[in-house]
Amino acid sequence: MASKKLCNFTPMYIGSFTFSATNGSMIFLDLSFNQLDSKIPQDLGNMYYLMIMNLGHNLLSGAIPVELGGAKQLAVLDLSHNQLEGPIPGSLSTLALSELDLSYNGLSGPIPDLGSLATFPASQYENNSGLYGFPILPHRDAYSSGANLAPGDTYHLIYFILAGIVIAIAVIALCLYLVIVRKLKKGEVSASVDDLADPAVGHQLISHLELVRATNNFNEDDMLGSGGFGKVFKGQLSCGLVVAVKVLNMQSKHTIRSFNAECGVLRMARHRNLIRIITTCSNMDFKALVLQYMPNGSLDMLLHHPRAGERQIGFRERLDIMIDVSMAIEYLHHGYHEVVLHCDLKPSNVLFDEDMIAHVADFGIARLLQSDHSSTIASNMHGSIGYMSPEYGSYGQASRKSDVFSYGIMLLEVITGRKPTDAMFVGELTLRRWVHQLFPAQLLHAVDTRLLHGSSSTCDLDDSFLVRVLEIGLLCTKDSPNERINMSDVVVRLKMIQIEYTKWTTQTSSRQVQHND
């Protein structure tokens, strides 16, 4: 029998601090998206200082422990998307919860009509077929005879209003408490962090103060880049690990959504060609992601802003890069139990490690499809001009095929050396239309001349390989989503070209050696 992934909190070790659930000083606990499949430990109710607990999107079963009501400071509780059963404990009514999500479980029985539990909308309890009571529709037995509302409704309404006032006061008190703690620490901001994923770092807490030290107070000289959601700095943690610190712009209205999206995707996705998240630092007025450092820049820089003396990349290098990217997107689209839509594929979001392995980055506007059968979802944050599919740019509808379109434009750009926003593309003329007009007889007029004599080529490139690669780009960028190929097909086709190109170059080099001899 396979061993279960147990939630064992006694004792727990974080950095150099050791504590148990009975006397722990943990304030933030996030174990979501980890496929935990045990019962919820009763000892969590002994964690007096715990304010935020997120166990959502796991496989937790059994009943919600009555003992959770003992975590008196708990303000945010997320147990959604699990397999929990039984009633909602009345003990949770004693907590001053400001956020609650119990949706997508197998809970049953009445929703307690006391305290904060009665103040949340029905959406926080939905997809629990056995629940009834406020704010869910009443249990069918209570109204099967057509009885009117109970005469005590006015009393309950007054009670709910008073409960709301109490909750508001509690939230204000919590905010004041955090401000006082911050001042007492002389400016050091406590950070709520995920467990560090890099073994070189261990399980250390990353504070705002540590990030300030690591980046020389976010010195502009250490800035790697900037965008709509903030700036990225190079930094070195106290353990010696060099990292990239992405500091989000707290003035943007999309910051919280961007932070949550990127954390959600990178926390659950594991692939050689996806950038790795190491940890996060988050509080009310500061949010940052600590990411794997990519020392060799982006695909955009490699194509359009090469450094002095940097070697030119030939067909083989460009083919390898686009295969890396295609495998990452195939994994997001087809290799995980949830479909991940990147929504902003472009060369500046493809980064290179020390071995020039490509990594897809920047999931700030990524979207999740809850089911493999879902084809599109609504989105209110569009991607980048030139790379967006027609349906995404016009209607904000994202799907796997809209990612495929963006990938196809990037593939055409890699082979032609021209951006979709190049000055030559005006009016009805686009990068895709230009390539399509030259396909296949005049394609050499569209190909980046640097590609023909790159470092991987020993002779002129055979036209057939260019035709086949650009054909994939054209198939990915058809106007109708239904006519585009999927990313699995892209991977298969590009790998076949890679195999045949390797065979061709080997044979050609062998013939040249024989000729010289």
Image (tube, rainbow, N blue to C red):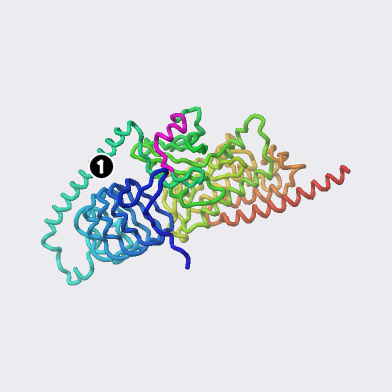
Residue at 70 percent across and 53 percent down: it is 499
Left or right: where does residue 409 sit relative to residue 455? left
- Specify few, some or many for label 1: CA neighbours under 10 Å numbering under 14, 14-19, or 20 or more: some
Depth order, front residue of 374/210: 210
Residue at 66 percent across and 43 percent down: it is 317
Q: Can residue 380 be seen in this view?
A: no
Residue with the most extreme bottom position: 145
Tell me, yes or no, whether the highlighted magenta stretch contains residue 381. Answer: no
Q: Where is residue 127 in the image (x, y as percent from the top left)?
A: 33, 62
In the rendered image, which quarter is residue 105 located in? bottom left
**Location of residue 113 with respect to 73 vertically, above or below:** below
Q: Where is residue 56 in the image (x, y as percent from the top left)?
A: 37, 55
Depth order, front residue of 262/411: 262
Q: What residue is pinned by disc 1?
A: 174
Give the residue type that dot 1 points to.
Leu
Q: Where is residue 113 in the image (x, y as percent from the top left)?
A: 20, 58
Left or right: where does residue 400 sit relative to residue 462? left
Q: How many labels does the image show?
A: 1
**Location of residue 125 with respect to 187 vertically, above or below:** below
Q: Can residue 318 be seen in this view?
A: yes
Q: Quadrant of the C terminus?
A: top right
**Location of residue 134 with respect to 185 vertically, above or below:** below
Residue at 39 percent across and 39 percent down: it is 287
Left or right: where does residue 264 sit relative to residue 349? left
Q: Give the range drawn in magenta.
A: 204-217
Depth order, front residue of 77/242: 242
Question: What element does badge 1 sit on?
Answer: helix
Depth order, front residue of 407/420: 407
Q: Where is residue 283 in the image (x, y as percent from the top left)?
A: 35, 40
Tell me, yes or no, whether the highlighted magenta stretch contains residue 216. Answer: yes
